[in-house]
Image: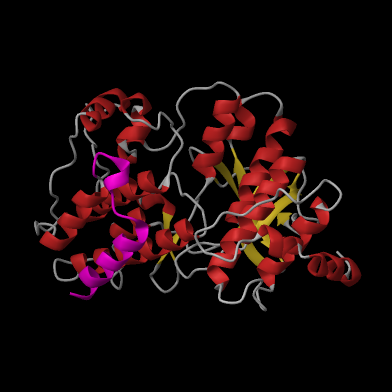
Amino acid sequence: MDPERKQNIDSGGLLRGAIPAAKESQISIANISSKNAQDTIDAAWLKLDIPTPLIHDGSDAQTQAAHLRKLCRDVSVKYQMLPSTFYLTGVVCVNREPSETTRYVDIYEGKYQGASVVLKRPRILDDFSGDEDKKPVFCCESILWSKLSHRHVLPLLGVSMEALPDIVCAVLPKLGSENLRQRLMSREPDKQLTEVNYEQYVNRWLHETAQGLAYLHHQGVVHGDLHGGNLLIDDADSVRISDFGIAIMSTAIMDEYGSGHAATAYQYMAPELLDPELFESCTRFPSTASDIYAFACTAIELYTGKVPFSSRRDTLYAVSKRVGRGERPPRPCTPFGAPMGDALWELVEKSWAHQPKTRLTAAQVAQGMETIARS
């Protein structure tokens, strides 16, 4: 968007009118018409990169960013458009076959602006006919994941349509090769966990995860598939949350096409996702509350080194029935036999409470984990 058009948008007050001054208020696109929608979404997209001066005095940059991202998504959904600079250019794929495949994505290696990147192509786009119809869903949802900035969140650099022929893919920075599950099992001399340091490391990683999750929730982003495999380890041996939102998009597309259960790791799924009819919400879409439940299950995983409900008898059906009855994994011990501390166990129990409304918030979990990690 050229400077003259940008000035027209800003002076017209479209962003000021759409973005609320109060933190708790909701954005409104009622005054955004088809004639000014593209200019508005472009101005909002640019404002995410240049947050100051703030749109409203007395606001803060994080809340403003959350509102701007939601504004972009809502305009995108209503008018079936994207910001003019949404797609990245110059992204190159260096391997035509996936280097790795997960439940949700095919992963390729790539280059962008001279740096190594990871290209993730949602596998859900292969599962049904009409691939072109599902690309807008992916792009609209990925607006919410874009331009995030937190030390414990792996940022989405953008979306590329050119790296793979006729395929849309997410572009992310390339970290080391380890996720937290692999890091727990490391036998490298300078990384090996011992009886002395195991709880210290795990509690710090849980605190970092909670911090990143609290940021995502504040920005209006639900992870949807939190577990040790989606917690990457960077060069500073700290957690970076990855693959947030992909489960949400997959569930949305599967609903649209009348498919069955989403492929979220069921051992981490909250009871309202396993059997929505038992709850008032009657929805199988992940939420901030189900993320907190998954955090509690991730704490069990990190303490034990094992996935919750990991026996052969623990099928999806069996776990659904057990969790629906209120059963949860027992209080765990580390591989060295040390039981989870009282404070953390209390936090875990509050986080996987049966009723979603009674669970802790991510901010409360982060605050609690800060105290636990420092003790």
Along the horizontal axis of the image, is 170 left or right of 254? right
Q: Which residue corresponds to the image point at 62% horizontal and 43% vertical from the top-left? A: 121
Characterize the magenta stretch by its predominant secondary structure. helix
| Image height of 126 relative to 2, above or below | above
| Residue 6 drawn at (x, y percent) | 84, 68
Dividing the image into 4 quarters, which one contains the C terminus? bottom left
Q: Which residue corresponds to the image point at 13% horizontal and 53% vertical from the top-left? A: 333
Which picture quadrant has residue 275?
top left
Q: Is residue 364 magenta?
A: yes
Is 24 in front, or is 171?
A: 24
Along the horizontal axis of the image, is 219 left or right of 178? right
Q: Which residue corresponds to the image point at 18% horizontal and 60% vertical from the top-left? A: 344
Q: Is residue 104 visible?
A: yes
Q: Is residue 283 magenta?
A: no
Which picture quadrant has residue 79?
top right
| Residue 235 drawn at (x, y percent) | 45, 72
Along the horizontal axis of the image, is 292 left or right of 258? left
The figure's colour scheme reads secondary structure
Dividing the image into 4 quarters, which one contains the N terminus? bottom right
Residues rendered magenta in the picture = 353-375
Q: Which residue corresponds to the image point at 40% horizontal and 32% vertical from the top-left? A: 281
| Residue 249 drawn at (x, y percent) | 56, 39
Is 155 in front, or is 177?
A: 155
Is 338 in front, or is 194?
A: 338
Which picture quadrant has residue 207?
bottom left
| Residue 189 drawn at (x, y percent) | 28, 71
| Image height of 252 relative to 196, above or below | above
Along the horizontal axis of the image, is 228 left or right of 104? left
